[in-house]
Image: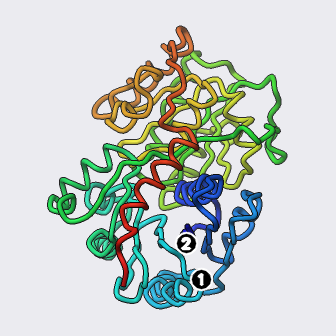
Amino acid sequence: MHILIAALHRPTKPTGVCRHAANLAQCLADTPEVSKVTLIVGTWQKDYFEQFFHSPKIQLITVDIKNSSLARNIWFLFGLPRLVKQFSPDIVHLSFPFPFLRPLFPCPVVSTIHDLYPYEKPEVFGYPNVIFNRLFLKQCIEHSDGLTCVSKSTLSSLNSYFPKTQTLKPIAVIYNYVDFSNIVAEPPHNLDISDHDSFLLCVAQHRKNKNIDLLIQSFSFLKKNGYLKDETKLIVVGSTGPETESLVNQIQHLSLQDQVLLIHAIKDHELCWLYQKCEIFVAASSQEGFCLPLAEALYFSCEVVCSDIPIFREIGSSSCCYFDVERDTVKNLSQAIISTLEQPVNRTANDLQFSKLDVANQYLKFYSTFSFISQ
């Protein structure tokens, strides 16, 4: 079986969508049923993906276009179908929703749905951008031959906004997997921090729904009131976004320039080190489709504090300390951090639903549904 994965995406630094596409390619390549994986990315994404793969089954194809919304969408509509005809895969897998013309594809097209943010959290995109995001998401959902949702929470949202979809095409919940077994942790080379330093960790893009500003407020409160050691830092790993300027201003206003560190680019072995060494991992989001960093933190047995939202309960079960994100949020998050510092949570065993082999087998089973579809 030959799978072509389309992962050409705007960000110049790795995001959750990038990690999903890379993980998808790697787990499929590890199975005997898959003979080849063709992964399509933009030239600005090349460095990350080249470092990620070691399988001879994976062919990385870079597309040299302007990294703009117009250029990308034109390529989705017309450039991608040309590559599909050139490489003749058995299935095309869109690693995130984007517009495409189904009649131009000679094979089944499946798409990963990460979230329904354009409908549930329009403020993440702003107006008028959200209008186009809704249009592209709707078009992708309706034109795909099948859909994979990254969580039960995402499937529930999909059914709320597109109630007829489940009766029209195959849909499966397939979680992202976590596997750092072949990576040797090393301290970040551009970060002034050592094995003996104390820090809280957050891994999140600078977007409104991630509530990084709430975490910074709580961190400031805990420092001022002596709940954290003087040398404790807050490290936020994530690509820049709509909230970056506001976060920088907040850090300066609270005089936390030396204590809150925003890291925009990091290698996997450095991220592993941060997970292993952090005192607490914090995920304060108000809305998520999956949140791979939370699954990664649990993989490393981090002490975890996170907002009490359905997807985090789905992923974290009883292994996290949850806080109410609806009211008195600074107080609630601060208290959750204090409680975790004083009495760590008893974590449950690692869940096999996030294992590479299990996820690969679920995808193969899902792909087999489309063996009868032809153009």
Q: In which quarter of the image is residue 143?
A: bottom left
Describe the element under mark 1 as helix, strand or loop: helix
Sooner in the amino-acid sequence: mark 1 or mark 2: 2
Q: In which quarter of the image is residue 161?
A: bottom left
Please report contact status of discs 1 and 2: CB closer than 8 Å, yes or no: yes
Graded by Cα atoms within 10 Å as few (under 14), some (14 to 19) or many (20 or more), the crowding at tag 1 reads: few
Graded by Cα atoms within 10 Å as few (under 14), some (14 to 19) or many (20 or more), the crowding at tag 2 reads: many
The structure residue drawn at horizontal position 49% and vertical position 30%, both measured from the top left corner, is 218
- Residue 35 percent across, percent down from the top left: 63, 65
Tag 1: residue type?
Phe
279 shown above or below 205: above
What is the number of the mark on residue 87? 1
What is the number of the mark on residue 4? 2
Tag 2: residue type?
Leu
The structure residue drawn at horizontal position 44% and vertical position 37%, both measured from the top left corner, is 284
The structure residue drawn at horizontal position 37% and vertical position 33%, both measured from the top left corner, is 314
Q: Quadrant of residue 111?
A: bottom left
Describe the element under mark 2 as helix, strand or loop: strand
Is 319 left or right of 12, judged from the image as shown? left
Is 23 left or right of 318, judged from the image as shown? right
The structure residue drawn at horizontal position 37% and vertical position 30%, both measured from the top left corner, is 313
User: Among all residues in the image, which is located at the extreme top?
Assistant: 343
Is 113 left or right of 227, judged from the image as shown? left
Identify which residue, 224 or 178, lies in the foreground: 178
Identify which residue, 34 or 206, lies in the foreground: 34
Quadrant position of the C terminus in the picture: bottom left
Quadrant position of the N terminus in the picture: bottom right
CA gap, disc 1 and disc 2: 8 Å
- Residue 40 percent across, percent down from the top left: 60, 74
- Residue 337 percent across, percent down from the top left: 50, 21
What is the number of the mark on residue 105? none
